[in-house]
Image: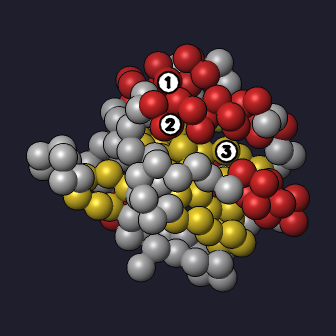
């Protein structure tokens, strides 16, 4: 079962990409002083991820005070860095979940019927405080639903 409000996200570790470099980093080290928003998508350059992340840029998520915005997707670190450069948002960072271990630790990994031997995380978002306690959780029950951006923003305000 994916994490819900009141539970603590595991302190997973994976390559964290900043648009230029990547370094193995624990979630706890990537969070801001007040916490973070962890957004899981299948692949960085998928149409849905491009749509979502451009919306986050337009919504000003880079201006969250003391709250990191962290993506998780199955792409490798070079693709993640290219995606961040495409977004032109050096303040967003992405965990490269190449082997699916991060998604599995969040109980989000799902096989994709139309993609032989490929599994991706369910599209989801978690707002966590600086201790990784989930303040808000959303896990889509289909592959195309948009994130409830206003609910996420309200949860960030409440941190």
Residue 98 placement (x, y as % from top left)? 30, 43
Q: Marks 3 and 2, Cα distance to the nearest angstrom?
A: 14 Å
Is 47 placed above or below 154 here? above
Circle 3 sits in a helix, a strand or a loop, which is it? strand
**45 sits to left or right of 101:** right
User: In what quadrant of the picture does the C terminus appear?
Assistant: bottom right
Given residues 116 and 109, the one toward you in this image is: 116
Q: Give the number of the disc on residue 1.
A: none
Is 27 placed above or below 94 here? below
**22 sits to left or right of 52:** left
Q: Marks 2 and 1, Cα distance to the nearest angstrom?
A: 10 Å
- For label 3, the crowd category at 10 Å Cα-Cα, with few meaning under 14, some 14 to 19 and many 20 or more, is many
- For label 1, the crowd category at 10 Å Cα-Cα, with few meaning under 14, some 14 to 19 and many 20 or more, is many
Residue pictured at 66% horizontal, 73% vertical: 133
Q: Marks 1 and 3, Cα distance to the nearest angstrom?
A: 14 Å
Residue 73 placement (x, y as % from top left)? 42, 43
Residue pictured at 54% horizontal, 44% vertical: 71
Residue 8 placement (x, y as % from top left)? 58, 76
Could you say which quadrant of the image residue 153 lies in?
bottom right
3 or 2: tag closer to the N-terminus: 2
Disc 3: which residue: 69
Disc 1: which residue: 83
User: In what quadrant of the picture does the N terminus appear?
Assistant: bottom left
**89 sits to left or right of 159:** left
- For label 2, the crowd category at 10 Å Cα-Cα, with few meaning under 14, some 14 to 19 and many 20 or more, is many
Q: Would you say residue 145 is visible in this rendering?
A: yes
1 or 3: tag closer to the N-terminus: 3
Residue 36 placement (x, y as % from top left)? 69, 55
Disc 2: which residue: 49
Circle 2 sits in a helix, a strand or a loop, which is it? helix
Residue pictured at 67% horizontal, 25% vertical: 89
């Amino acid at each position: 079962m994916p994490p819900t409000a009141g539970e603590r996200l595991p302190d997973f570790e994976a390559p964290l990409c900043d648009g230029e470099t990547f370094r193995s980093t624990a979630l706890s080290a990537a969070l801001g002083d007040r916490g973070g928003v962890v957004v899981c998508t299948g692949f960085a350059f998928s149409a849905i991820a491009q749509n979502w992340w451009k919306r986050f840029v337009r919504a000003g998520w880079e201006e969250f005070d003391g709250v990191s915005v962290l993506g998780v997707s199955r792409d490798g670190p070079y693709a993640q860095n290219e995606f961040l450069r495409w977004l032109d948002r050096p303040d967003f960072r992405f965990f490269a979940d190449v082997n699916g271990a991060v998604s599995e630790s969040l109980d989000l990994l799902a096989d994709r019927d139309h993609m032989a031997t490929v599994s991706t995380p369910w599209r989801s978002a978690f707002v966590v405080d600086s201790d990784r306690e989930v303040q808000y959780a959303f896990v889509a029950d289909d592959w195309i639903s948009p994130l409830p951006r206003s609910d996420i923003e309200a949860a960030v305000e409440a941190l």
